[in-house]
Image (cartoon, rainbow, N blue to C red):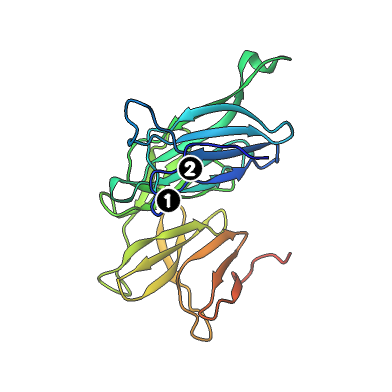
Amino acid sequence: ASFPHHAWGNSDSETGCCAFASGGRYLWATVPTFTPEQPLLADDAVWLIDVATRALLDTRRLNVAGAGCHPVHHPDGDTLGLSIGEGQDGSPIRWVRPARDHDGQPGSSVRIDLRFAPGDDRVLMDVHPAGHEYLTTPHGSGSWELIRHRFADDAAIEKLAAPTEFSEEDRWDLYAGYLTEDLILASTSDGESERHLLVERQPMRLVAAVDYPFDEQAGAFNSPRRGRWLTVGAEGDLHCWVLPGAAAG
């Protein structure tokens, strides 16, 4: 299936994202839109596509011109978080989910339920496995803390400044996630080196720094969950790390 849309205004600096819904029924995609009145002013939209029928069910404007987009699934199986980077203009967060008109009665249509998270300079990194909160990191200005937010209304639950035990210049980097229900894995950087830190979720406090073997360099990591996470080594090898005491499987 092919779904034509407007060309990106600048292919080198503007991109969207797409993700299947957890159940596989829908495909989400962000695309650029332009108007005849303002042909050079982009306003990205999110599309909801039915996978089985390949039909575009609904589209909503996001009020952004994204230089990049990162989708984050909510454990409810329906909601998707969109962390949208606009370069120097900020990093807004949008929440989308499919919703049926007419209480889901036969013949009712599916529309997009869209929610704008307040603020425009936080990076959405992960949603707690229980779904009641999510985690954001700094984008480049404003609040430099690692922040837990309540999912229901996006309000900040707790904030943690970057620890200075290892370097006075340490700042939270982009990467963070819920390693377990009670433990966060997050990265810091002082401009020269990076560290991966274990942070207690509630109350937020530093537990320890990850001590990697064989000179493994801390950098980007992915998929923190159930006591495991992934990194890419200096030679391009994919490494899976396991928290001591994490259940096998």
Instruction: Find the distance from the CA under tag 1 to the CA under tag 2.
Output: 20 Å
Q: Amino acid at mark 1?
A: Ser
**Toward the viewer: 86 or 127?**
86
| Residue 206 drawn above or below residue 36 | below
**Toward the viewer: 212 or 37?**
37
Q: Position of residue 161 (x, y in %)?
A: 31, 58
Q: Secondary structure at mark 1?
A: loop
Does the residue at mark 1 contact the one at mark 2 (Cβ under 8 Å)? no
Q: Secondary structure at mark 2?
A: strand
**Toward the viewer: 140 or 20?**
20
How crowded pointer 1 is (Cα within 10 Å; few <14, some 14-19, many 20+) is rated as: few
Query: In the displayed image of the protein, which residue is found farthest to the bottom?
Result: 214
* Residue of label 2: 82
Residue 132 shows in this picture: no
Quadrant containing the C terminus is bottom right
Q: Position of residue 150 (x, y in %)?
A: 45, 39
**Marker disc for residue 117:** none
Q: In this image, 46 relative to 77: left or right?
A: left
Quadrant containing the N terminus is top right
Q: Which residue is painted at 64% across and 66% down in the image?
A: 246
Q: Amino acid at mark 2?
A: Leu
Residue 18 shows in this picture: yes
Q: Position of residue 129 (x, y in %)?
A: 59, 48
* Residue of label 1: 11
Q: Position of residue 124 (x, y in %)?
A: 44, 48
Mark before the other along the chain sequence, 1 or 2: 1
**Toward the viewer: 66 or 115?**
66
| Residue 13 drawn above or below residue 210 | above
